[in-house]
Amino acid sequence: MVNAVPAVVIAAPASGSGKTTVATGLVGALRAAGDRVAPFKVGPDYIDPGYHGLAAGRVGRNLDPVLVGADRIGPLYRHGSAGCDIAVVEGVMGLFDGKIADPAPEGAAEGSTAQVAGLLGAPVVLVVDARGHSQSLAAVLHGFATFDSGVRIGGVILNRVGSERHEQVLRQACDRVGLPVLGVVPRLAELAVPSRHLGLITAVEHGRAATDAVDAMTELIAQHVDLAAVRALARSNVDAQAWNAVDEVGGDVSGPAPVVALAGGSAFTFGYAEHRELLEAAGARVCTFDPAADQLPDGAAALVLPGGFPEEHAPELAANIPLLTTVREQARRGMPIHAECAGLLYLARRLDGHPMAGVIGVDAEFGKTLTLGYREAVALGESVLFEPGTRVVGHEFHRTRLESASVDGWAPAWGWRAAGTSAREGFAGGGVHASYLHTHPAGTPAAVRRFVSAARAFEVSNG
């Protein structure tokens, strides 16, 4: 087997240290220097991979052991890095932060950057926000370097350094614990990427400004980070076979190729690259469209409405009345519809007062409370995606709320326990499966095959 593509994992002691700037800029700088770079993001993040993709000129992918299982991380890494010279993996939160468990795990938390670095056999580059740090940085670095013997910190990038004297003191602290300094990035507030209620604005929505931000990050890191040292540090010991979508859905897919309409545009930007690959492997022909401007693709036999920020684009979505009418009519006819988070809101009657498709008789509104976290869920009934009793791990990430968690004529899609209470969430009925819960299709490939089979049956019965 060909050796795995070498990787570096960009981590930090805490959120807000500048990982995204460094990781995105590093991807861009390595690419500009002639490397073919594979970008990855740890965790269920949909926003950073968009910026990584702009910098790399290829799709950004996620590595989340919680959603897909630790055994799939190596295969997904080999799949996403095929044909590349180096991979840059941006971590999530602090290096050892992950899924919260009680009692706390003895090793790396599940889903943490540390766990993924260990699964890849890749060294960690620790990005330190240098503001407020001086000689005591040595103690911080010593703690991170010795906390988990399974994690190797290969170097440090000092970020937001204030002066030459500040740099000198920080370098001395790194030398004291034997960690090489791979870069020193000065304070440049103008590189801040505009923020929104859930984090960064997606690259698709931000358009030219996103491209300009990526270019600025690339130039900054090219000037202040030792790319040769990063290349020399990169490693991976993954020896698993590359993930293969055809194998995951079971192969031998027979019958016509139904058209699956995949919502995109500015309102529906949350998705995983493997979803489309699995749909196609299961025999579907995937057609992307923008619900704010387009109609349902010709011959569509199923509809996927992924997550995103529809509350930011509700007027445009509401103005496309012909599409809303078509979606409502097709749902009544039993068209398979997979709707997650933004998709659920699109199927509601109204979103912040704007009329939506009205498939599900419930109104939604933007709220002040962020709902965030992994959920261990069980499918409560039969649907176009899951058999009753199917267990999955998903992730919630939203500030909107529904006026009611139940609607006459609809069964709940999921059940789970959280904070000592039982919850029922989402809506399932006919061909519709709509929920706030995001799942990673690579973790539930059987659901994708089941969905395409339902699309094929719908096409035959309505042909």
Image: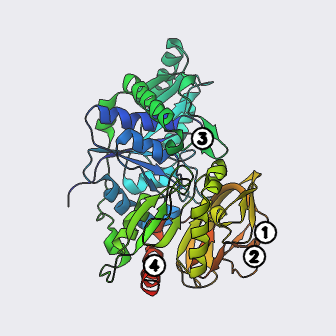
Which residue is label 3 attached to? 15
Report the Cα–Cα distance between label 4 and label 3. Answer: 42 Å
Disc 2 element: loop
Q: Residue placed at 65% from the left, 56% from the top? A: 318
Q: What is the crowding at mark 3: few (fewer than 14 residues within 10 Å), some, or many (at least 20)? A: some
- Percent x, y of residue 219: 40, 25
Q: Which mark is residue 404?
A: 1
Q: Nearer the viewer, residue 176 or 115?
A: 115
Q: Amino acid at mark 2?
A: Val
Badge number at residue 407: 2
- Whether residues under marks 1 and 4 lie with C-beta atoms below 8 angstroms apart, the answer is no
Q: Quadrant of the N terminus?
A: bottom left
Give yes or no for contact between labels 1 and 2 (Cβ–Cβ under 8 Å): yes
Around disc 1, counting alpha carbons within 10 Å, would you say few (fewer than 14), some (14 to 19), or many (20 or more)? few
Q: Is residue 171 left or right of residue 416?
A: left
Does any portion of residue 29 appear in the rendered image? yes
Binning the other alpha carbons within 10 Å of mark 2 as few (below 14), some (14 to 19) or many (20 upward) gives few
From the top left corner, tell me how far across and down residue 361 is, in percent.
73, 71
User: Could you tell whether 447 is left or right of 426 in the image?
Assistant: left
Query: The disc labelled 1 sits on which kind of residue?
Result: Ser
Q: How far is mark 4 from mark 2, CA to CA?
A: 25 Å
- Does label 3 or label 2 sit earlier along the sequence? 3
Residue lying at 59% horizontally and 41% vertically, measured from the top left: 15
Given this view, does label 3 or label 2 mark the residue nearer the observer? 2
Task: Give the residue at x 47% y 58%.
Answer: 289
Residue 89, given in percent of the width and then of the height, sits at: 42, 46
- Horizontal arrangement in the rendering, residue 121 relative to residue 331 (left or right): left
Using the image as rendered, state which of residue 188 and residue 69 is in the foreground: 188
Local secondary structure at mark 3: loop
Q: Which mark is residue 455?
A: 4
> In the visual, does 413 lie left or right of 216?
right
Whole-angstrom CA distance, mark 3 to mark 2, is 39 Å
